[in-house]
Image (cartoon, rainbow, N blue to C red):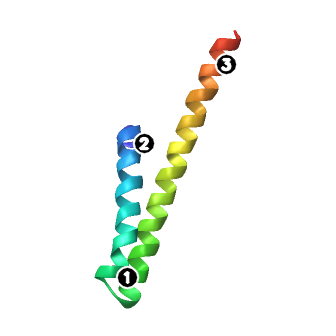
Amino acid sequence: MKAFITSKPVLWFLFLFNLAATAVIPFVAEGSQALGAVIGMGLVSVKAGIGLIVKYRRQNRSRYAHAAE
């Protein structure tokens, strides 16, 4: 399951979907419900974005390590 969740397509989906939902929720809900949803989905989006950056850096680091050999 971890391999599926940390795959690039799933991370991109989580990042973009939650980012879009975070932008739309304030227009659909009000009050503490909207605030909680925005914070929760925003955190998921940020974490998926960090996962994409880490995965990109690891991929490039291994690419440059093979080129130096």
Identify the amino acid type marked 2: Thr
Q: Is residue 63 left or right of residue 32?
A: right
Mark 3: few, some, or many residues within 10 Å (few <14, many ≥20)? few
Distance of label 1 from label 3 (alpha carbons): 46 Å
First of labels 1, 2 by sequence position? 2
56 to the left or right of 36: right
Q: Amino acid at mark 3?
A: Ala
Judging by the rendered image, the residue that carries numbered circle 2 is 6
Residue 31 vertical placement versus 19 (above, below): below
Q: Nearer the viewer, mark 2 or mark 3?
A: 3
Are discs 1 and 3 less than 8 Å apart at CB?
Answer: no
Which residue lies at the image location 39% right of the left edge and 70% below the top edge?
Answer: 23
Does residue 7 appear anywhere in the picture? no
Q: The residue tagged with tag 3: helix, strand or loop?
A: helix
| Tag nearer the camera, 1 or 2 | 1
Q: Label 3 belongs to which residue?
A: 65
Give the left or right position of residue 47, taking residue 31 as reference: right
Amino acid carrying mark 1 in the image:
Ala
Q: Nearer the viewer, residue 40 or 26?
A: 26
Secondary structure, mark 2, is loop
**Which quarter of the figure has residue 68?**
top right
Residue 58, image quadrant: top right
Residue at image coords 37%, 82%: 34
Across and down, in percent, residue 39 comes to 46, 73
Q: State the residue position of label 1.
A: 34
Q: CA distance from mark 2 to mark 3?
A: 23 Å
Residue 11 visible from this viewpoint: yes
* Residue most extreme to the right: 68
